Amino acid sequence: MKRPLAIAVNFFSKLLRQRDLVVNFAVRDLRSRYVGSAMGFFWAVVHPLALLVTYSLVFSGILNIQLDKYPQINDNFAIFLFCGLLPFLYFQDTLLRGCESVVQQSNLLRKTAFPSEILPLTIVLSNLVTHLFGLAILLAFLLYFGTLGWTLLLLPPVLLLTAVMCLGLGWIAAALQVFLRDTLQLLTVGLTFWFWLTPIFYRMEDVPGWLRPWLGANPMRFVVDAYRSILLENTPPSADTLLALTAWSLGAFLLGGFIFRNTKRDFVDVI
C-alpha cells in the first residue's frame, strides 16, 4: 500500500504534467463567457467598473458614509468596500462554477480517460484573469489617491494563497456535486451567509466582542484583511493573518485533493 505522501505527490505531479491541457481549457472557458458579444473581453472591465461607480453613487454620493481610518483614500467608503468585495467575488464565483465543472463535462468523462481534476483548476485560472481586470481598476483609483507603495509586492503571494484555497474547496464542491446534486444550491445559500459574515461592509473592529472569535475563524476574513492592509494602508499584513491564510489554503488544498482523488473513480458511474 502506497504511503499517503507518495499518493499526494503522484496526484499533484499528474496535475503538473497536464499543464498544457489546463491552460487550453482555461482559455476556452474564458472565451466561452464572451463569445458572440460585441465588446468581448471588454465586459470583464465593464462589470467591476459598474460596481465601483454604483457603490460610489450610493454610499458616498447619497448616504455620505465616511470612514475614520483611511485618510489615504479620503475615507472613501466605496473604495474600502470594493477592496473587500473583489477577492470575495473571485472566491464565490470560483466555488460556484467549480462546483458544476465536472458534471457539465459529463460527456467528456464518459468517452475518454479525461483527467477530471483539472476542471476545477481551469475555473480557478480563468476566474483569476477576470479578477485581475477588476484589480487593475482598483489599482488605477488607488494610484490616483497616491496610496500604493512597496507592499503591493506582497499582493501576488496573497492572491496565490487565495487561489490555492479556492482550488481545494472547488475540488470538494465538484466531487460532492457529482453524488449530491443539491450541493450547488446548498453552496449558494451557504455563500450568502459567508458573504455577510466576512468583514466586507464593515471592519473587524466594529464587530461585537462576543462575535469576533467566531468571525475570526473565517478564512476569507484573512484574505480581506490582507488586501486592505496592502492596498489601503500600505502596510504588510500581520504575521498572524499570513500564517492563518497559509494554514487555511494548504489545509483546503490537501483535503480537497484527497477527497477528489478518492472519489473520481466513481464519477463515471453516476454522471
Image (cartoon, helix red, strand yellow):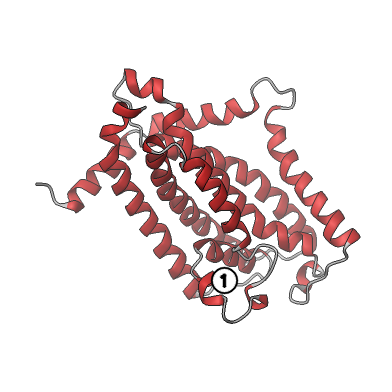
Position of residue 152 relative to residue 53, above or below, is: below
Q: Nearer the viewer, residue 42 or 147?
A: 42
Report the residue at 59% width, 27% height from top.
31
Write down the quadrant of residue 263 in the picture: top left
Task: Tell me residue 104's x, y (percent).
Answer: 46, 28
Going by the image, does 247 lie left or right of 55? left
Q: Is residue 13 visible?
A: no
Q: Is residue 256 visible?
A: yes
Work out which residue is located at the far top of the displayed protein and give it.
Answer: 111
Q: Quadrant of the C terminus?
A: top left
Q: Nearer the viewer, residue 63 or 180?
A: 180
Report the residue at 39% width, 42% height from top.
176
Which residue position holds label 1?
A: 236
Determine crowd level at label 1: few under 14, some 14-19, many 20+ residues with C-alpha closer than 10 A. many
Position of residue 170 relative to residue 198, above or below, is: above
Task: Tell me residue 180's x, y (percent).
Answer: 40, 39
Task: Tell me residue 47's x, y (percent).
Answer: 73, 41
Going by the image, does 177 lie left or right of 196? left
Write down the quadrant of residue 152 in the picture: bottom right
Work out which residue is located at the far bottom of the displayed protein and give it.
Answer: 209
Report the residue at 49% width, 32% height from top.
26
Give the structural element (helix, strand or loop) at label 1: loop
Report the residue at 51% width, 65% height from top.
218
Work out which residue is located at the far left of the displayed protein and give it.
Answer: 1
Q: Amino acid at mark 1?
A: Pro
Task: Tell me residue 204's x, y (percent).
Answer: 62, 73
